[in-house]
Every structure is written in C-alpha cells, then in structure tokens.
C-alpha cells in the first residue's frame, strides 16, 4: 500500500526522523494559511508547494492544463516582497494545481489528478543524498542503500555509476548497528554534526522499516543543511499489504482515489487483478499459471486484457465477482478460464462462472479449461448448465481457441 | 528413491481449520503417514478422518481409511508422543511464522509452510532464526512436497503424479501441476516434486533443491519452473553450469508481464529493469537448460533435455 509524501513525513516525524515543517492543503485558502506559520518557524522566507499523488517524478512532471507548470514549485517571492508576496504566489499556484492533471514518468500519459498540496518550509541545502531501505531478496534481509547522488533516480545511478551506491545489510536479530550507519555516513563524506545526525537518522529509518512492515522507504533527496542538520526532503513509503492487519492505524491513510477502481474492487474480493491493454480476458488460479496464460495468449497471436489470479481460497461468490470484473471491460472480446485445481476446486470455479453468466449474460466467446481437484464435478456443472462454453484439452489449445474465436 | 519425503516421513499438522482439515484428509487418503495435529486449545482430543483411499497414492492399502488423529497443545508434546519428523503449516498468515519457529524449536527436520500472505518481515526473522538449526523450511506460499506413491504433504492434487525419473522444483503452485501432469503423460514420472513458493523470502531455494536432486541416484533429470522477479533463477543457472551433470529443462512465467506491477505473488515483480523473464531464460539456456517456450511444452522440453544428454 502506497501513501502520500505528507503522510509518510508525519509518520517519520512521530518516530523522531527529521523532516521539514509542512502543512497539507486541499483548497487555495488552506495553502495560503500555511505560509505565515512556516515562514515564522523557519525564519526563511521561502516555501515549497508540492503536488501529492502516488507517483514519482513530480518535479519534472508537467500539468496537462498548464504545460509550463511543474508538480513541485519553490516560491522565493518572499525574499524581496515579504510574506504577502509569498501568499499571493502560493494562492495563484494552488488555484492552478488543485484539480489539474499531473503527468510524470511514473503516472503514464493519462496522468493523475492533484487533490492535495503540501506546503513546506524552504531549506538551505548544503548537500543532497539518497537513502533507502529495501528488501534484499538474495540475503532475505533488509538493506540500507545510500548514495551521494541525491535527486537522481537510483536506477540511473545504478546504471551509470554503480560504485556510488553504498549498502549495509541489516541482521534482523541486531538491527542496524551503529558501526554500519557510521560506515555509510563516512562513505557519503559526512563529518562533524552531520555525521552524528546521519547515523541517528539511519538507525531510526531502519527501525521504522522493521516496526511498520514497509515494502520500501526511499528518501530522495536526503539533505544536509549548512548547519549540519540531516532531513528527509522527500519521502516515499510503501507498506507490505500482508502486514496491514497488525497496523490498523494505517487504514485511514489509504487514498482510494489513487487506485484503479477495478483493481480496488478485485482486492475487496481477495482477487489479484491487473488491467492490461489487450482483448482476451483471463480468469486463472495461481499467479504463475496466470502469468503463463498471458504469455501463451500472446504466443498464439492474442493480447491479454488482464492478469487475474482468483487465489486458492476463492468461493463461488469471489469467482462470480471476478467474471463480472472481466466482462465489464468493453475491450474484452473473449474470455479464457484456465484452472488447474489444487487448493482451488474445479466445481467452485464452474459454479462461479455459471452464476455470473446467469446474472450478467455472456456476449463474447468463452473457453474453459479445467484440470485438477474435482475436475469431473466441474465439467459436469458446465455441461448441465447449457451454457455456450468451448472446452480445451490444455492451456495452449485453450489459448488458440479463444484467440481464434475472438477474431 | 526420492528426496525430502517418503514412507519414513511421520507428519504432524499445524493449523487444522477448514483448509488444513480438507488437505489433511486428502493426505491421509493418499497414504501419507500423518501422526499428530497441534492446536493450543484442542490438546488431548482426537480428530477423525475417514473415507475412500486415493488409489493413486501409497499402494497395498484397503479401500477405506479411518484415522483418529491425536491432537496436542504444542509441537514439542506432539514430537515427544509420536516421533513426528516433519510438519506442515496451514496456520493463518499472522501466526504462521510463529508456527514455523515452534516446529524448528521442537527439532522437526522438515517444515512445509503452505500459508500464503505472511508478512515479509516475519519471514526475514524466520530465515535468520533457522540459520544453524537442523530444520529445513519449504515455502511459504507453496503447494508442498510430494513423492508419488509414498508421501503427499500439501495441497497438490495427488492423482496427476506418477513415480518416475524426474525431479520437479518450482516457484509456482499451479505451474508445478502443469509440469507434473505433462511428465506423467510423457511416461517420465517424478521422483519428488518440490514447490518452493512464490514469496520474496523463503526457505529452500532452487539451488538447495538442485543439490538434493543431484545427490539422488533415481533422479535422472530435473525440471525447474521459475517466474519473474529476483535473481533465484540466475543463481540456479550458475549452479547448474558449475555442478550439475544431469539434464535440466525449464520454464519461466511472465514474459509478457509489465514492469513495476506485482503479478499476484509478492515475489513476482520486474523492478528497476531487474528480474525479467528474458534475462532468466538467457541465463538458463547459457547453462545448457532446455527452456520451454510455452507451459504446454514443459514435458516435451524435458524429453528434449534427456535426448540431448543421451538419456532419453
């Protein structure tokens, strides 16, 4: 589960991780109201107005409605014009940004609507760094990654100058040790107060990752101020969905407007669904088989309209919901149900499909391939239903049949 | 012969909710020697399983089975009373890591965790805790392990399996069934089929499983089924090139998966240009593995690998 930057920073602040002061705003008035308290507390006549969407690349992104305007703007009008000038500029920016569509490298061409802004105090930056906590699958442990190339996408750094990425693997029985944090901070060229502050920052961040079950924490940039303070200027946090039941306080941070409606509905039914661009709807059990079904459809000349794994514990009701989500997509010209029952029983799938077709009808060809647990029972249910179903002997046969039928 | 499990396996079950009970029933019907169940509030009771035996399982049994499975409060009690040497975990996600740790603490040699949806940080702790112990973990989020006609641990349908010459190791449950069925249909059969699971942090990995199959004299060839995400397939390819003189076939799911999208399994994601199917296929082919282009061709790929090695 992803959250917004302002939410991530609030969570970090609660755990003693240094972030700049800021206020969230959903209207131009709220944005303007944030200006004076921020300037008074920081003593710096500069604020930053940041679009809050679940995608990176906001600074370089542009609004569809205002091609000259980026998703993050530093307001320096107050340096010569005083707080009134800052407020006027923030109002003008907020009026243009709120409700407009921001397109970044990560949003896709359709962009995302900006519904919230984060107004933050300006920081006198001496140095921009990169810091992240990610899972290292090879060791099965969390990994703290740091680089001097703050502000740059880490993939680009890994490509161009991999030696600039420093790593420390965290032993879960120990946590991030002081010497490890020190080694990283020294590797980044820090000294004096900045070194001590960076060590404290890293240790708190590693503990945050463990305690809050994050999938990813990325601080880019992590900034060092001229006074030697170390702060998260940006903060991207994603949580492990499997661990959310033990963090009930995170439920309210979920922003459903940022999620695809079909994917959201699917997840409510315990389905794993991802919308794709093709015409063949797929209903499959098992993630590996679902991926392989997409691959096979492509190999026989079709394009999958979705990835859909009904999972092992699906009920007839879940299967019916899955079928409806697929048929609702107007791009779908044919449906391929591919089941190899193990924990999933073929009769459950067959009942779900029959119930869905009875309820919403069937306007496109349907190919069903059943194998595994209770296969005979499943086939019997389909036969006795009288539905117009094509059957397939194996996956390749089924994929070929549905691609042909959908032409 | 076989690896990991056989007629000597004495299985206990942790987690006897509806799924755990259903698959325990199927395992007993197959002929698996299930000796105990563990439930903290049902110690001292017995759980009855009865029905028709699964004819595809252990041979030489009657037509019906009746088992009164003794229940224990702790794994340690169950081991002391029954001599269990393997455990299968069906405990729900937030309790599953603790169940694995309890089995390891009781000295269980083989723990097979079926549970899907365990938090990653829990598995980070489990993996660390199992280091240096005598416990081997299979999974989590896996179909389990089966040696045909001897022992079935997990959720796989028994009837598709047939004893034979090929070791199966897979990250995906349902694709394991595809491979197994094709090996059975091709008359090759299986020595043992191991599902290692689709999570980013798991117990036994591809290389561990390949080592087991390399040492098993009955295993003449191995089929390896991977998917996008991580580098486990690349590590397996390097090990195969260096150490394995048995023919290997493979399949990688996710050629068409878009980057940045998690394809169901927590571990199946292409990110930062890493973990693509193409890179994995290239690594395996570089190690001499015959890689099937579609999952319907896995059996044929195994036959081809055996033919190339002169063992068809």
Image (cartoon, helix red, strand yellow):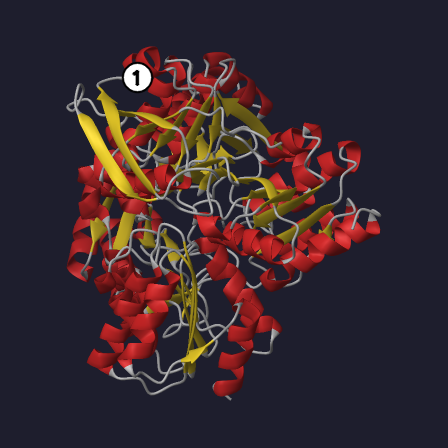
Q: How many marks?
A: 1
Q: In this view, does A297 lie above or below B15?
A: below
Depth order, front residue of A63/A213: A213
Q: How crowded is mark 1: few (under 14 residues within 10 Å), some or many (20 or more)?
A: many
Instruction: From the top left corner, tell me how far across and down residue B301 is, in percent.
Output: 70, 56
Seen in the image, is B57 located left or right of residue B2? left
Q: In this view, does A151 lie above or below B243?
A: below
Instruction: From the top left corner, tell me how far across and down residue A402 is, in percent.
Output: 49, 80
Instruction: From the top left corner, tell me how far across and down residue A144 is, in percent.
Output: 49, 29
Instruction: From the top left corner, tell me how far across and down residue B215 is, in percent.
Output: 69, 27
Task: Give the quadrant of the N terminus of chain B.
Answer: top right
Q: Is residue A132 above or below residue A334?
A: above
Depth order, front residue of A126/A329: A329
Q: Is residue B270 visible?
A: no
Q: Residue furthest top?
A: B80
Which residue carries the number 1 mark? B78
In terms of secondary structure, where does tag 1 sit? helix
Depth order, front residue of A90/A269: A269
Residue at 79%, 47% in the rendered image: B288
Residue at 51%, 30% in the rendered image: B5
Q: Can residue B6 be seen in this view?
A: yes
Residue at 35%, 32% in the rendered image: B89
Residue at 46%, 56% in the rendered image: B261
Depth order, front residue of A89/A132: A132
What is the chain identity of the residue bearing mark 1?
B
Q: In which quarter of the image is residue A184?
A: top right
């Amino acid at each position: 589960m992803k959250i917004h930057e302002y939410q991530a920073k609030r969570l970090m602040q609660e755990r003693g991780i240094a972030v700049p002061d800021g206020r969230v705003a959903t209207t131009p008035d709220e944005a303007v109201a944030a200006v004076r308290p921020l300037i008074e507390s920081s003593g710096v006549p500069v604020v930053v107005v940041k679009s809050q969407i679940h995608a990176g690349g906001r600074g370089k992104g542009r609004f569809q409605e205002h091609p000259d305007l980026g998703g993050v703007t530093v307001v320096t009008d107050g340096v010569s014009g005083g707080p009134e000038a800052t407020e006027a500029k923030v109002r003008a920016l907020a009026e243009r940004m709120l409700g407009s569509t921001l397109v970044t490298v990560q949003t896709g061409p359709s962009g995302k609507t900006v519904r919230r802004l984060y107004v933050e105090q300006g920081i006198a930056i001496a140095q921009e760094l990169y810091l992240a906590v990610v899972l290292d699958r090879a060791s099965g442990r969390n990994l703290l990654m740091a680089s001097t190339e703050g502000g740059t996408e880490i993939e680009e750094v890994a490509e161009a100058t991999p030696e600039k990425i420093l790593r420390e693997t965290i032993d879960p029985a120990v946590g991030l040790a002081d010497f490890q944090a020190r080694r990283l901070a020294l590797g980044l060229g820090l000294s004096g107060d900045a070194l001590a502050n960076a060590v404290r920052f890293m240790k708190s961040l590693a503990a945050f990752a463990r305690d809050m079950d994050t999938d990813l924490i990325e601080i880019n940039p992590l900034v060092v101020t001229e006074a030697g303070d170390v702060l998260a200027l940006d903060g991207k946090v994603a949580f492990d969905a499997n661990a959310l039941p033990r963090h009930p306080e995170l439920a309210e941070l979920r922003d459903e407007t940022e999620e695809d409606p079909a994917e959201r509905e699917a997840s409510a039914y315990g389905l794993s669904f991802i919308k794709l661009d093709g015409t063949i709807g797929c209903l499959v059990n098992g993630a590996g088989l679902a991926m392989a079904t997409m691959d096979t459809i492509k190999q026989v000349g079709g394009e999958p309209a979705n990835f859909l794994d009904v999972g092992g514990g699906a009920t007839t009701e879940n299967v019916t919901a899955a079928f409806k989500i697929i048929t609702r997509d107007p791009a779908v010209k044919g449906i391929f149900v591919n089941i190899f029952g193990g924990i999933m029983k073929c009769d459950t799938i067959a009942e779900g499909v029959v119930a869905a077709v009875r309820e919403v009808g069937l306007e496109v060809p349907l190919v069903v391939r059943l194998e595994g647990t209770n296969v005979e029972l499943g086939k019997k249910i389909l036969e006795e239903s009288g539905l117009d179903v094509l059957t397939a002997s194996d996956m390749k046969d089924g994929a070929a049949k549905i691609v042909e039928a959908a032409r | 012969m076989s690896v990991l499990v056989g007629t000597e396996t004495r299985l206990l079950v942790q987690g006897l909710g509806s799924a755990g009970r259903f698959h325990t029933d199927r395992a007993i019907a197959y002929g698996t020697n299930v000796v105990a169940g563990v439930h903290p509030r049902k110690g001292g009771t017995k759980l009855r399983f009865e029905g028709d035996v699964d004819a595809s399982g252990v041979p030489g049994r009657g037509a019906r089975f009746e088992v009164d499975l003794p229940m224990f409060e702790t794994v340690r009690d169950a081991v002391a009373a029954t001599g269990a040497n393997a455990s299968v975990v069906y405990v729900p996600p937030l309790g599953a890591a603790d169940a694995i740790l309890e089995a390891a603490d009781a000295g269980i040699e083989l723990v097979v965790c079926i549970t899907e949806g365990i938090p990653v940080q829990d598995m980070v702790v489990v993996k660390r805790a199992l280091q240096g112990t005598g416990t081997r973990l299979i999974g989590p989020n896996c179909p389990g392990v089966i040696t045909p006609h001897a022992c079935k641990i997990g959720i796989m349908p028994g009837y598709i399996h047939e004893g034979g010459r090929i070791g199966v190791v897979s990250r995906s449950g349902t694709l394991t069934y595809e491979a197994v069925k094709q090996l059975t249909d091709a008359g090759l059969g299986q020595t043992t089929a191991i599902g290692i699971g689709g999570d980013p942090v798991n117990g036994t990995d591809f290389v561990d499983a390949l080592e087991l199959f390399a040492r098993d004299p009955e295993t003449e060839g191995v089929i390896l089924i991977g998917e996008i995400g991580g580098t486990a397939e690349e590590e397996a390819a390097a090990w195969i090139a260096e150490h394995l003189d048995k023919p290997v076939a493979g399949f990688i799911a996710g050629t068409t998966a878009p980057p940045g999208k998690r394809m169901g399994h927590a571990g199946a994601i292409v990110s930062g240009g890493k973990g693509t199917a193409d890179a994995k296929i290239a690594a395996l082919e570089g190690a001499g593995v015959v890689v099937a282009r579609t999952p319907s061709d896995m059996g044929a790929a195994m036959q081809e690998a055996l033919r190339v090695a002169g063992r068809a």
